Amino acid sequence: MKGLGVSQGIGIGKAFIIEKKVVNISVNQTDDTDNEVRRFHNALENCKKETEELYIKTLNNIGEKEAMIFKSHEMILEDEVFISDVETKIKNEKVNAEFAVNEIAISYIKMFESINDEYLRERADDVKDIMNRVLSELMGINTIDFSKMEKDSVLVVKDLTPSDTAQLDRTKVSAMITEIGGKTSHAAIMARILGIPTVVGLEGIVDNVKSDDIIICDGKSGKVIINPSEKQKQYYSNKRKKELNIIKQLKKQIGLPTVTKDGFTVSLSSNISSPRDVDSALENDAEGIGLFRSEFLFMNRNCQPTEEEQFNEYKEVLVKMKEKPVIIRTMDIGGDKEVSYMDIPKEMNPFLGYRAIRVCLVDTDMFKTQLKAILRASVYGNAKIMFPMISTVQELKDAKKIYEQAKDELRQKKIPFKDNIEIGIMIEIPSAAIISDILAKEVDFFSIGTNDLIQYTMAVDRMNSKLAHLYSQYHPALLRLIKSIITNAHNAGIWVGMCGEAAGDPKLIPVFVGMGLDEFSMNSPSILRARYIIRDLNKKEMDKIADDVINIETAMEVEKYLSCIFSESEIESRLCGNMKYNY
Ligand code: PEP
Ligand code: MG
C-alpha cells in the first residue's frame, strides 16, 4: 500500500490500531439492581484509576497543560449528578448498568451539543470518551489508549489531531499511519519534530490491518507493508540501519558554521511547539528558534493560559537558548488548530476564516496578555516577536499599536522588559507577498511561511490528501513569490527567513541559498543534514540555479531539474562511506 510519506525514516513493529468501536448496548431487565449499581461503581473506579495513570504519564512525558485534559475527565467520573442519574435509572427501571450509562450519557451529550457555546459543545466529546470507557469496562471490552501501547508500535489510526500527537510516547511509537492528513497538517509537522516516521492519506488502512500485524512503514516513500516477508524485513531493517548511520555521520556537523564554500553564511534554526522541544533543537545544534508556535500553549486545556503561565513558558525557552535568537510567533489558532474554549465558530473554510492575527485583533485583551508575557520574558534572552497571517498593512499597524499599548502598561507598572526587540511578520498569504516591499518598511524581518503560502497560492487545502499533487513547493508560482519577497526584504534593508516546511527540503535549500535567504528554520531532526548540504554549496553557482528554476514551466519539471543538481542518494553514499548495505 502507498500513502503520502510526511516524516522520513523507517518504522518496523506491531500494529497498534486506534478505532472508535461501535458497541451495541441492549436493555436487560433485572431484579438484582443492587448488583448493577455495584458493577457501575466498580467500572467508575477502574476508569478513575486509568485516568489517573494517564494524567501522571502525560504530566511526566509531556507537560502539565496536556495532562489537564485527564483531570477534567476525572471530574466527570466523580460528578454526583451523573452518578445519581445512572443509579436512579437502574433502580427505577430495573435495567442493566450498561443500558443506564448509555442512556444517561447520551442525554448529557445531546444537551451539551445543543448549547450555543463552543466550549460546552466540546464537553460532549469528553462525555462520549468517558461513556465509551465506562461501557468498555462494564462489558469487558479492551479499551485502547496510548498507555497500553508497547515499545516499537506502529500506530494505525483514521485521523490524528495535534492533541493526539502531543500525547504520544515517542519511545514507544516506531511509526504512524493515518487515513487523513496532508504533508503540512499540524499532526504531520509534529511527527517530524518528534522524528517519528509517518505516512498519511492511506485510505482504508484501519480496516485492512489487525492488531499485532507486523507493519513496515517507510515515511519517505509512503510505502506501507503489512506482514512483510523475511526478505522484505531484511531489506527494510538494513535500510533503517543505513539511515541511523547517516544520522550518526551527520552529528559530525555539530559545532561547524553554516557557510557555503565561497563564504555565504546563513542561520539554521529550529521550529518548536513547546519548551520541551528545545532539548532536541539544542542536540541538533540549532542556532536559534526560528518559529515558536505559541498557539500550542493555548491547546488541550479548558481556558486561556494566564499571563504568568505564558511568561513561564517563554522564559523557559529563552533561558535554555541563552543568547541565541528565539522568534515567538503570537498565537495562530484556527485552521486545523482548534481551541474549544475560544469563540471561534465552525466555518465553511476554516483556513480562509477567523484565524491567527484576525482573532488577536478582535480579542485584543488576549493578544495584549500574550504580548506582555513575551515582553516580560524578553529580559531573559534574545526574544523576537512575529505576527502570523498578515494580509494587509493595516493589520500590521493595528498589531503594532496593541504591542505599544502592552509596553505602556508594563511601563506604568514598572515591570522590566527589553524595549528594542525585533518585530517581524510571517509572509504566508499571497497579498502580503505581493506587497512585501511596502510591508518591509514596517518591520525588522520577514519569515516566509511556505505551508500556508502554498495552500493560498494554489487554492489547495493543506489537509486534503486527494489534492496533494497540486500542493507543491516546487511550483514556479511559489518560487517566484519567494524570490520577490527576499528581494523586497533586502532592498528595504531587513533580513528574511523561512519557517515553512520547504526550508528543510534538501532539493530546495540550494535554490533558497541562491536567492539569498538569510535564515532557514525547520524541524530539529533536519538541521544537520541542511548544514551538510549548505557547506557543500557554492553560492555563485546557486545564484544561477535560482534564476533558472523560476523560468521552468511546471512543478514536476522543477523537481526533476533540482533532482539532477542535487542527488540525495549521492549525499547518502558520501555520508555512509564504504559501508555496504545489502538491500
Ligand atoms: C507556514 O504556514 O508555513 C507556517 C510555518 O505556519 P503554520 O504551519 O503553523 O501554519
Ligand atoms: Mg502558517
Image: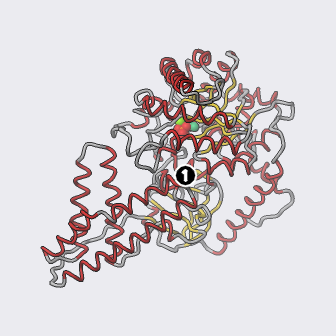
Q: Can residue 298 be seen in this view?
A: yes
Give the residue number, with chain letter if any, for mark 1: 4
Q: In which quarter of the image is residue 546?
A: top right
Q: Foreground residue, 551 or 210? A: 210
What colour scheme has been applied to the protein in the rendered image?
secondary structure
- Name the quadrant of the C terminus: bottom right
Residue 324 to residue 569: above or below = above
Residue 112 to residue 133: above or below = above
Q: Residue at x 35, y 75 (%)?
A: 137
Q: Is residue 392 left or right of residue 482?
A: left
Please state the horizontal and vertical placement of residue 194, each as a whole percent of the image: 61, 54
Q: Residue at x 83, y 51 (%)?
A: 252
Q: In which quarter of the image is ligand 1?
A: top right
Q: Looking at numbered disc 1 in the image, what kind of residue is underneath it? A: Leu
Q: Foreground residue, 485 or 150? A: 150
Q: Residue at x 75, y 41 (%)?
A: 566
Q: In which quarter of the image is residue 241?
A: bottom right
CB of mark 1 near ligand 1 (< 8 Å)? no
Please state the horizontal and vertical placement of residue 44, each as a whole percent of the image: 34, 72
Please state the horizontal and vertical placement of residue 518, each as a whole percent of the image: 72, 29
Q: Is residue 471 visible?
A: no
Find numbered disc 1 in the image and state the secondary structure of the residue it sits on. Answer: strand
Please state the horizontal and vertical placement of residue 49, each as a whole percent of the image: 43, 71
Q: How crowded is mark 1: few (under 14 residues within 10 Å), some or many (20 or more)?
A: many
Q: Foreground residue, 363 or 490? A: 363
Q: Is residue 455 left or right of residue 343?
A: right
Q: Which residue is drawn at 61% across and 59% down?
A: 218
